[in-house]
């Protein structure tokens, strides 16, 4: 006895087979979201090396050709996925910042950042890929859209820091988040060690070389913010 395919699935399969993009704006947005969700799930499960557009299409329930109607390259898809994850993070960060009572000290910002960014997460992995993606098969228009949206996110969060952190210099939010990305990427690489290196690092004599992502990230953000505040105070005029 053959498998009975539901009518709704028959319609979707027919649409995919014809290589059609969803025409309804809501349907298009839903499909784009489904693609990004599938890519994020696979990135968490198998990592970048084993991730392909074919795998993403299969997980999203689409034909590979349909995927290319929404994202021209894997690099372009990564940029959109990173924007989605960054948007979620900036929202979480902003909510936590607003929940803190009174003026927020640099150490509290460091604690919030460390509590909301996990080592080995898809966000940290995507942050390490962003400039590689921009240098690869990404067109100027795509890069411009990505960087403009990234600037908007960082600017909004930077203005929030100005309001909440006493002495935080005006207009320096984007600069702070640029430093933060470098800090997150550097620490992520420091804790993502190959098995032989981890085995060697188990030697107690090498304990000073070990990196605890959360505590180092918190300390780094705290020092960065304090330095920016002091820099602004020492500036002439």
Image: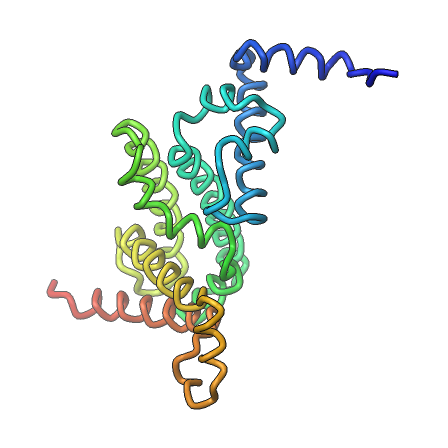
Residue 96, above or below 217: above
Q: Quadrant of residue 236?
A: bottom left
Q: Position of residue 2 (x, y in %)?
A: 84, 16
The residue at the far right in this view is 1
Q: Position of residue 10 (x, y in %)?
A: 71, 12
Q: Quadrant of residue 41?
A: top right
For the point 28% across and 67% down, the residue is 229
For the point 12% across and 62% down, the residue is 237
Question: What count of labels does the image hold?
Answer: 0
The way the protein has been coloured in the rendering is rainbow
The quarter of the rendered structure image containing the N terminus is top right
Q: Position of residue 23 (x, y in %)?
A: 53, 11
Residue 180, above or below 23: below
Residue 124, above or below 202: above
- Tell whether 115 sits left or right of 225: right
For the point 35% across and 45% down, the residue is 130
């Amino acid at each position: 006895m053959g498998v009975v395919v539901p009518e709704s699935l028959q319609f979707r399969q027919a649409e995919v087979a014809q290589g059609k993009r969803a025409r309804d704006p809501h349907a298009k947005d839903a499909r784009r979201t489904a693609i990004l969700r599938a890519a994020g799930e696979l990135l968490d499960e198998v990592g970048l090396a084993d991730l392909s557009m074919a795998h993403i299409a299969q997980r999203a329930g689409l034909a590979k050709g349909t995927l290319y109607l929404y994202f021209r390259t894997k690099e372009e898809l990564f940029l959109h996925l990173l924007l989605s994850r960054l948007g979620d993070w900036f929202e979480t960060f902003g909510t936590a910042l607003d929940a803190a009572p009174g003026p927020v000290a640099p150490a509290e910002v460091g604690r919030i950042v460390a509590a909301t960014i996990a080592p080995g997460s898809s966000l940290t992995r995507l942050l390490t890929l962003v400039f590689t993606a921009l240098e690869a098969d990404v067109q100027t228009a795509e890069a411009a859209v990505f960087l403009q949206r990234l600037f908007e996110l960082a600017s909004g969060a930077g203005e929030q820091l100005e309001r909440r952190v006493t002495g935080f210099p005006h207009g320096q939010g984007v600069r702070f988040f640029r430093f933060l990305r470098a800090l997150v990427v550097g620490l992520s690489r420091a804790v993502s060690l190959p098995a032989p290196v981890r085995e060697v690092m188990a030697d107690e004599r090498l304990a000073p070389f070990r990196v605890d992502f959360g505590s180092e990230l918190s300390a780094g953000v705290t020092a960065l913010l304090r330095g920016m505040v002091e820099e602004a105070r020492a500036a002439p005029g």
